[in-house]
Image (cartoon, rainbow, N blue to C red):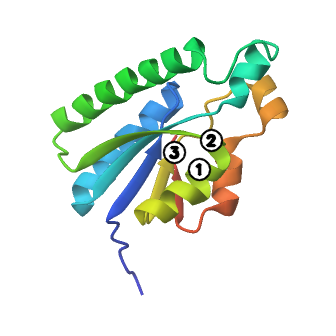
Amino acid sequence: MNQVQHYKRILTPVDGSEAAEKALQTATEIAKRNNAHLDILNVIDLKQFSVSFGGMVDANGDVVYQTFEDVDKYLNELLEKTKEQGLEDVEVHARFGSPRTVIAREFPADHQTDLIVMGPTGLNPVERVLVGAVTDYVTRAAQCDVIIAR
């Protein structure tokens, strides 16, 4: 019994890493083959500011605003590249929160995601030990299919 799965709403989280952008390529191809909608998501974790700056940055301050502006610019660049590759049904999103829960549960529930395509990790080995791999969590906690694009 060889049944082909058809996906209609695909999520690809991106973090600026090479692995995430390779996963975006894979997701774009899957979306084109399935005539599916593609959501490109970047999750801004506010905890990174207190860790990065020793708790000295107000979470409502200029650093957070500049980070959001940088993410918005990055996402719009990815949107244009994806459209140039022939996929028109694509949207970009930026959210604040825990990348683990936003990617695995919150965003898919809000957008009826039926497939998440992501890279193996965007973190270096030390960061994985300290923060934990988001990819590992998503593969265990997501309610939809997850593809790890290598």
**Image coordinates for residue 126, horizontal then vertical, percent:** 80, 24
Q: Which mark is residue 28?
A: none
* Residue carrying label 3: 118
* Residue carrying label 1: 102
Residue nearest the viewer, comparing 3 with 44: 44
Instruction: Choose mark 1 or mark 3, whichever is in front.
Output: 1
Q: Quadrant of residue 10?
A: bottom left
Q: Earlier in the sequence, mark 1 or mark 3?
A: 1
Residue nearest the viewer, comparing 95 with 61: 61
Q: Which mark is residue 97?
A: 2
Local packing at callout 1 (Cα closer than 10 Å; few below 14, some 14-19, many 20+) is many
Q: Earlier in the sequence, mark 3 or mark 2?
A: 2
Local packing at callout 2 (Cα closer than 10 Å; few below 14, some 14-19, many 20+) is some
Mark 2 and mark 1 in contact? Answer it, CB < 8 Å. yes
**Image coordinates for residue 30, horizontal then vertical, percent:** 32, 54
Q: Is residue 120 above or below residue 56?
A: below
